[in-house]
Protein backbone atom coordinates (compact mmCIF):
# COMPACT_ATOMS: atom_id res chain seq x y z
CA UNK A 1 0.00 0.00 0.00
CA UNK A 2 2.83 2.38 0.84
CA UNK A 3 4.53 1.62 -2.48
CA UNK A 4 1.27 2.36 -4.39
CA UNK A 5 0.89 5.67 -2.56
CA UNK A 6 4.49 6.60 -3.40
CA UNK A 7 3.85 5.87 -7.09
CA UNK A 8 0.71 8.04 -7.04
CA UNK A 9 2.66 10.90 -5.46
CA UNK A 10 5.35 10.58 -8.13
CA UNK A 11 2.70 10.61 -10.88
CA UNK A 12 0.99 13.74 -9.49
CA UNK A 13 4.29 15.58 -9.11
CA UNK A 14 5.58 14.62 -12.55
CA UNK A 15 2.45 15.05 -14.69
CA UNK A 16 0.39 17.68 -12.82
CA UNK A 17 2.42 19.86 -10.50
CA UNK A 18 5.51 20.22 -12.66
CA UNK A 19 3.57 21.19 -15.84
CA UNK A 20 1.46 23.66 -13.83
CA UNK A 21 4.60 25.28 -12.38
CA UNK A 22 6.17 25.43 -15.84
CA UNK A 23 3.08 27.17 -17.27
CA UNK A 24 2.96 29.56 -14.32
CA UNK A 25 6.61 30.54 -14.79
CA UNK A 26 6.00 30.95 -18.53
CA UNK A 27 3.05 33.24 -17.80
CA UNK A 28 5.17 35.47 -15.56
CA UNK A 29 7.92 35.59 -18.18
CA UNK A 30 5.33 36.54 -20.77
CA UNK A 31 4.01 39.32 -18.52
CA UNK A 32 7.56 40.60 -17.98
CA UNK A 33 8.26 40.69 -21.71
CA UNK A 34 4.93 42.44 -22.36
CA UNK A 35 5.75 45.06 -19.74
CA UNK A 36 9.30 45.66 -20.96
CA UNK A 37 8.97 45.44 -24.74
CA UNK A 38 5.28 46.38 -25.09
CA UNK A 39 4.78 43.44 -27.44
CA UNK A 40 1.82 41.05 -27.16
CA UNK A 41 2.44 37.95 -29.33
CA UNK A 42 -0.75 36.36 -27.98
CA UNK A 43 -2.84 39.17 -29.36
CA UNK A 44 -1.12 38.88 -32.72
CA UNK A 45 -1.71 35.10 -32.75
CA UNK A 46 -5.42 35.52 -31.88
CA UNK A 47 -5.84 38.23 -34.55
CA UNK A 48 -4.36 35.96 -37.23
CA UNK A 49 -7.08 33.36 -36.67
CA UNK A 50 -10.28 33.58 -38.72
CA UNK A 51 -13.30 34.88 -36.95
CA UNK A 52 -13.75 37.53 -34.28
CA UNK A 53 -10.89 38.15 -31.87
CA UNK A 54 -12.26 37.48 -28.42
CA UNK A 55 -10.63 37.84 -25.02
CA UNK A 56 -10.61 34.05 -24.66
CA UNK A 57 -8.64 33.61 -27.88
CA UNK A 58 -6.19 36.27 -26.76
CA UNK A 59 -5.61 34.40 -23.47
CA UNK A 60 -5.20 31.09 -25.32
CA UNK A 61 -2.68 32.74 -27.61
CA UNK A 62 -0.77 34.18 -24.66
CA UNK A 63 -0.64 30.79 -22.94
CA UNK A 64 0.40 29.08 -26.17
CA UNK A 65 3.24 31.47 -26.97
CA UNK A 66 5.15 30.79 -23.75
CA UNK A 67 3.39 27.72 -22.37
CA UNK A 68 4.05 25.38 -25.30
CA UNK A 69 7.85 25.97 -25.28
CA UNK A 70 7.88 25.65 -21.49
CA UNK A 71 6.09 22.30 -21.64
CA UNK A 72 8.41 21.11 -24.41
CA UNK A 73 11.47 22.05 -22.36
CA UNK A 74 9.99 20.27 -19.35
CA UNK A 75 9.33 17.10 -21.36
CA UNK A 76 12.84 17.18 -22.84
CA UNK A 77 14.30 17.57 -19.36
CA UNK A 78 12.25 14.66 -18.00
CA UNK A 79 13.21 12.44 -20.93
CA UNK A 80 16.89 13.19 -20.44
CA UNK A 81 16.59 12.65 -16.68
CA UNK A 82 14.84 9.32 -17.18
CA UNK A 83 17.47 8.17 -19.64
CA UNK A 84 20.26 9.08 -17.17
CA UNK A 85 18.47 7.25 -14.35
CA UNK A 86 17.98 4.23 -16.59
CA UNK A 87 21.63 4.23 -17.59
CA UNK A 88 22.73 4.52 -13.96
CA UNK A 89 20.41 1.69 -12.93
CA UNK A 90 21.58 -0.46 -15.82
CA UNK A 91 25.23 0.15 -14.98
CA UNK A 92 24.60 -0.70 -11.34
CA UNK A 93 22.91 -3.94 -12.32
CA UNK A 94 25.71 -4.81 -14.71
CA UNK A 95 28.24 -4.07 -11.99
CA UNK A 96 26.41 -6.34 -9.56
CA UNK A 97 26.06 -9.14 -12.11
CA UNK A 98 29.56 -8.80 -13.52
CA UNK A 99 31.85 -11.30 -11.77
CA UNK A 100 34.41 -9.65 -9.60
CA UNK A 101 38.06 -10.38 -10.11
CA UNK A 102 39.02 -12.73 -7.34
CA UNK A 103 42.48 -12.31 -5.88
CA UNK A 104 44.76 -15.07 -6.92
CA UNK A 105 46.14 -17.06 -4.06
CA UNK A 106 49.54 -18.46 -4.70
CA UNK A 107 49.50 -22.12 -3.82
CA UNK A 108 52.83 -23.20 -2.57
CA UNK A 109 53.71 -26.58 -3.94
CA UNK A 110 54.72 -29.04 -1.27
CA UNK A 111 58.36 -29.99 -1.39
CA UNK A 112 58.73 -33.78 -1.62
CA UNK A 113 60.38 -35.42 1.37
CA UNK A 114 63.35 -37.38 0.04
CA UNK A 115 66.50 -38.74 1.66
CA UNK A 116 69.27 -36.22 1.15
CA UNK A 117 71.51 -36.41 4.25
CA UNK A 118 73.36 -39.35 5.88
CA UNK A 119 72.59 -40.37 9.45
CA UNK A 120 75.93 -38.95 10.56
CA UNK A 121 74.78 -35.49 9.48
CA UNK A 122 71.78 -35.84 11.80
CA UNK A 123 73.93 -36.73 14.80
CA UNK A 124 76.37 -33.90 14.08
CA UNK A 125 73.45 -31.50 13.69
CA UNK A 126 71.94 -32.45 17.07
CA UNK A 127 75.35 -32.65 18.78
CA UNK A 128 77.80 -30.35 16.96
CA UNK A 129 80.61 -30.96 19.41
CA UNK A 130 82.67 -34.16 19.05
CA UNK A 131 81.33 -37.08 21.07
CA UNK A 132 83.54 -37.80 24.07
CA UNK A 133 81.78 -40.82 25.52
CA UNK A 134 79.46 -43.58 24.38
CA UNK A 135 76.84 -42.19 26.78
CA UNK A 136 76.65 -38.99 24.73
CA UNK A 137 76.07 -41.01 21.56
CA UNK A 138 73.39 -43.08 23.31
CA UNK A 139 71.61 -39.96 24.55
CA UNK A 140 71.36 -38.50 21.04
CA UNK A 141 70.53 -41.91 19.59
CA UNK A 142 67.55 -42.33 21.93
CA UNK A 143 66.18 -38.93 20.85
CA UNK A 144 66.52 -39.87 17.18
CA UNK A 145 64.89 -43.30 17.63
CA UNK A 146 62.01 -41.65 19.48
CA UNK A 147 61.39 -39.37 16.49
CA UNK A 148 61.68 -42.30 14.06
CA UNK A 149 59.24 -44.49 15.98
CA UNK A 150 56.71 -41.64 16.35
CA UNK A 151 56.78 -40.92 12.62
CA UNK A 152 57.92 -37.34 13.17
CA UNK A 153 61.10 -38.05 11.22
CA UNK A 154 61.34 -40.42 8.29
CA UNK A 155 64.32 -42.67 7.71
CA UNK A 156 65.63 -44.59 4.72
CA UNK A 157 68.14 -47.38 4.60
CA UNK A 158 69.38 -50.49 2.77
CA UNK A 159 68.36 -53.69 4.47
CA UNK A 160 71.19 -56.21 4.85
CA UNK A 161 70.11 -59.66 3.73
CA UNK A 162 72.99 -62.08 4.02
CA UNK A 163 75.85 -60.41 2.22
CA UNK A 164 73.62 -58.27 -0.01
CA UNK A 165 72.52 -54.68 0.42
CA UNK A 166 68.92 -54.11 -0.76
CA UNK A 167 67.90 -50.96 -2.64
CA UNK A 168 67.39 -47.82 -0.58
CA UNK A 169 63.86 -47.82 0.87
CA UNK A 170 61.96 -46.10 3.67
CA UNK A 171 62.07 -47.91 6.98
CA UNK A 172 58.61 -48.31 8.60
CA UNK A 173 58.22 -46.46 11.86
CA UNK A 174 57.00 -49.64 13.61
CA UNK A 175 60.47 -51.15 13.13
CA UNK A 176 62.04 -48.47 15.34
CA UNK A 177 60.14 -49.36 18.52
CA UNK A 178 62.84 -51.88 19.45
CA UNK A 179 66.08 -50.82 17.81
CA UNK A 180 69.60 -49.70 18.63
CA UNK A 181 72.30 -47.91 16.71
CA UNK A 182 75.78 -49.35 16.24
CA UNK A 183 77.25 -45.81 15.98
CA UNK A 184 79.89 -47.10 13.56
CA UNK A 185 78.70 -44.46 11.08
CA UNK A 186 80.16 -41.79 13.39
CA UNK A 187 83.66 -43.17 13.08
CA UNK A 188 84.04 -44.52 9.56
CA UNK A 189 83.07 -41.48 7.49
CA UNK A 190 81.94 -42.13 3.91
CA UNK A 191 83.41 -45.60 3.95
CA UNK A 192 80.95 -46.66 6.66
CA UNK A 193 77.91 -46.55 4.37
CA UNK A 194 77.89 -50.30 3.78
CA UNK A 195 78.37 -51.40 7.37
CA UNK A 196 75.48 -52.01 9.73
CA UNK A 197 74.05 -48.79 11.14
CA UNK A 198 71.10 -50.07 13.15
CA UNK A 199 69.69 -53.34 14.48
CA UNK A 200 65.91 -53.61 14.71
CA UNK A 201 64.47 -56.49 16.74
CA UNK A 202 61.40 -58.13 15.23
CA UNK A 203 58.72 -59.84 17.35
CA UNK A 204 59.02 -63.26 15.70
CA UNK A 205 62.04 -63.08 13.45
CA UNK A 206 65.75 -62.33 13.52
CA UNK A 207 66.82 -58.68 13.88
CA UNK A 208 66.59 -56.58 10.73
CA UNK A 209 69.87 -54.89 9.91
CA UNK A 210 70.13 -51.67 7.92
CA UNK A 211 73.06 -49.84 6.39
CA UNK A 212 73.38 -46.48 4.64
CA UNK A 213 70.81 -44.75 6.84
CA UNK A 214 69.60 -41.44 5.41
CA UNK A 215 67.21 -38.68 6.49
CA UNK A 216 65.69 -35.49 5.09
CA UNK A 217 67.42 -32.24 5.97
CA UNK A 218 64.27 -30.08 6.11
CA UNK A 219 62.56 -32.50 8.48
CA UNK A 220 65.46 -32.82 10.87
CA UNK A 221 66.10 -29.06 10.96
CA UNK A 222 62.43 -28.46 11.76
CA UNK A 223 62.74 -30.81 14.73
CA UNK A 224 66.14 -29.56 15.84
CA UNK A 225 66.57 -25.92 14.77
CA UNK A 226 70.17 -24.85 14.45
CA UNK A 227 69.81 -22.15 17.08
CA UNK A 228 68.72 -24.73 19.61
CA UNK A 229 71.51 -27.10 18.73
CA UNK A 230 74.28 -24.61 19.30
Image: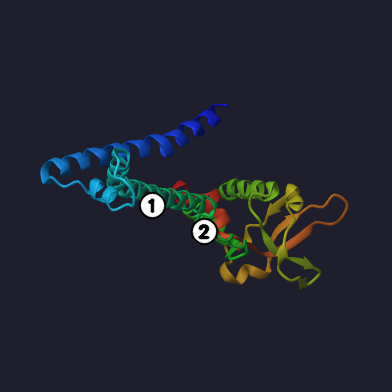
Looking at the picture, how far across and down is residue 182, in whole percent?
67, 57
Q: Nearer the viewer, mark 2 or mark 1?
A: 1
Disc 1 target residue: 80
Could you give the CA–CA distance between mark 2 and mark 1, rounded to whole angstroms?
A: 48 Å
Please give the label number shown on residue 106: 2
- The image shows residue 13, relative to residue 152, as above or below, that is above
For the point 78% across and 72% down, the residue is 163
Looking at the picture, how far across and down is residue 97, in whole percent?
55, 52
For the point 29% across and 48% down, the residue is 46
* Residue placed most toward the observer, 36 or 19: 36
Q: Are marks 2 and 1 in contact (CB under 8 Å)?
A: no
Quadrant of res 2: top right
Q: Quadrant of the N terminus?
A: top right
- The image shows residue 165, relative to residue 90, as above or below, that is below
In the displayed structure image, the side of residue 137 where residue 11 appears, left or right: left
Please give the label number shown on residue 139: none
In the displayed structure image, the side of residue 117 where residue 70 appears, left or right: left
* Residue placed most toward the observer, 33 or 167: 33
The residue at the far front in this view is: 52
Looking at the picture, how far across and down is residue 90, in whole percent?
49, 52
Amino acid sequence: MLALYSKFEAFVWKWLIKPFLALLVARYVYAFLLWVFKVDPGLWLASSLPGPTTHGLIEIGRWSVMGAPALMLLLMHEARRNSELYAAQRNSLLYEVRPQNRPRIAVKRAVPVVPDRPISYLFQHVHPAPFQTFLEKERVGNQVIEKFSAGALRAWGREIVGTQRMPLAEIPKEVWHSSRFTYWFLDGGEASKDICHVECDGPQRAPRLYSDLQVNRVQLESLWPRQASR
